[in-house]
Amino acid sequence: MMPITLSFKKLTDNNASCYALIIEQGSLEQTLKKHFKAGDRALVKALAEERDFVGNNGQLLLVPVMHNGKPITILLSGIGKKEGKEALNFERYRRVLGTIVRVAEKNKIGTVAIQLPVAKLFDMTDEDVTQQTATIVEMAGYHFDEFFTDDDRKIMTPKEVILVSDARNQKEIRTALDIGKVIAESVNKARYWIDLPPAKLTPVDLAKHAQKIAKETGLKITVFDEREVTQMGMGGLAGVSKGSERDCQLVILEYKTTKKNAKTIGFVGKGITFDSGGLSLKPPAYMETMKEDMSGAAAVISTMQAIAILKPDVNVVGITPLSENLPSGSATKPGDILKFYNGKTAEVKNTDAEGRLVLADALSYAVKHCNLDAMIDIATLTGACAYALGPFFTGLMSQHEDLIDKICDSAERTGDRVWELPLHDDYKPAIKSQVADISNVGSKQYMAGAITAGLFLQNFVGDMPWAHLDIAGTAFNVPDISYYRPEGATGVSVRLLIDLAMHWK
């Protein structure tokens, strides 16, 4: 992890090789006056005029100067301006932070001191700005280079990032920094697992990571192996696993708050550690990133780590069905009928629609055994959702307005953005089967593959308040967001789930 520290000194009193300032449009002169002496101000102002830097959103200006006898860099990053009384869009700030880290990497800057902006620009508290800054800076520093043998290809992140705060409530600001780092650690842990080659992260491997977290944090953990899963009647999870030589696993992590009469929420994450499509084999181009098909499970397990540390006033259960989806002589075939933990049956028309099969058993287990007040599943479920919403919004489906509102509020606070799709009964005939209760793929005449997948899952949640998050487009290889890498895992939904638990009422 990239070291992130906090300072309450004046910006230029910190020992750094780069001083970074976020510039609101039109505020350059007064910002420079606050932080720099006349000579430095004049140089920066002259270069800004030459380069037409005024603080527009996305503008950058690097100015090398001598400061106290040593060369340093002043980095100015524009964020635009407020429109009337409207607060600045905080997502702009997140991306400015990501850009600062990228510039530091490119220029091999050792220590960066970032002046935290005034919280009222965003209608937020100093604590919230500090917390999210720590999270985003740490996320921006993540990189997966474990298998490079050429050191020149490895990214050199800053040796230290100093967050400089003018806030007076220093104790609360320090706590906010620590919370932000805990959240970032969980996001980046999920990203690391997702980025690992599938041979290095099998279902058993991921279950062992969950066991390690449980041991370190005091979470209760239960792991069912393939024999137990089969004996319990989980035909979906066992059926998907039949083509693989590696056993499937069902992992249950539990956090219990000390608050009396607390509510209990469940997070269920799809964990296909590699998805070839099974006998309905994917084309090679669609298979090459399918190590990411356990992104939902990675998000849930790493979220549970943060929850164990942050201790929200709500009980949380994390459930992850883990399996590979591979072809073999023993694999589930198109035309097979699977029976799930809740007794329902499904005709398998396409073995590449396997995520809903493993989730069906996990959701059924949660309903029967976990005494939940609400449940959210997270899954790289459908290419249809990725095509519908692209890489910037996760698909949200639910028929429970209060839960939708809670999720949307957390999405707004964290930047883990969602967009609601209609989980409407008009689409239900699409998954009707002539030989079983339901079909695992929708009829082509209804199209709407993301929605019909959500309706399939609805068969396994009963009357419980439930929401489905389809992260197929947002989990991997997301372009143009500076605090992610353009290739690799994003850790999407970890921030959202943690925030949801911390704000649950």
Image (tube, grey):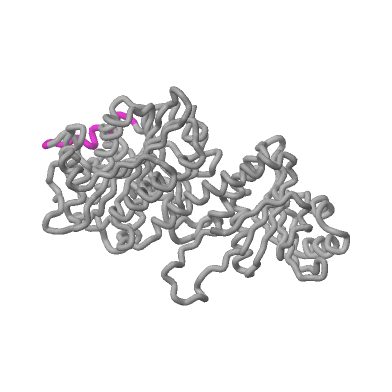
Q: Residue at 49% of width from left, 57% of height from top? A: 479
Is residue 163 shown left or right of residue 215? right
Is residue 369 shown left or right of residue 94? left
Q: Residue at 13% of width from left, 42% of height from top? A: 337
Query: For the magenta stretch, what is the residue range?
Result: 424-435
Q: Residue at 73% of width from left, 62% of height from top? A: 15
- Which residue is situated farthest in the top direction here? 261
Could you tell me if residue 387 is visible in this image? no
The answer to if 304 sits in the magenta stretch is: no
The answer to if 428 sits in the magenta stretch is: yes
Q: Position of residue 177 (x, y in %)?
A: 61, 46
Camera-side residue of 219 and 477: 219
Above or below, comparing residue 28 to residue 159 in the picture:
above
Q: Position of residue 305 (x, y in %)?
A: 44, 45
Q: Residue at 19% of width from left, 46% of height from top? A: 238
Q: Position of residue 234 (x, y in %)?
A: 19, 40
Q: How many marks?
A: 0
Above or below, comparing residue 90 to residue 108 in the picture:
above
Hey, which quadrant is residue 161 in on the image?
bottom right
Could you tell me if residue 244 is visible in this image? yes
Camera-side residue of 62 and 169: 169
- Which residue is situated farthest in the right direction here? 38
Q: Position of residue 220 (x, y in %)?
A: 36, 39
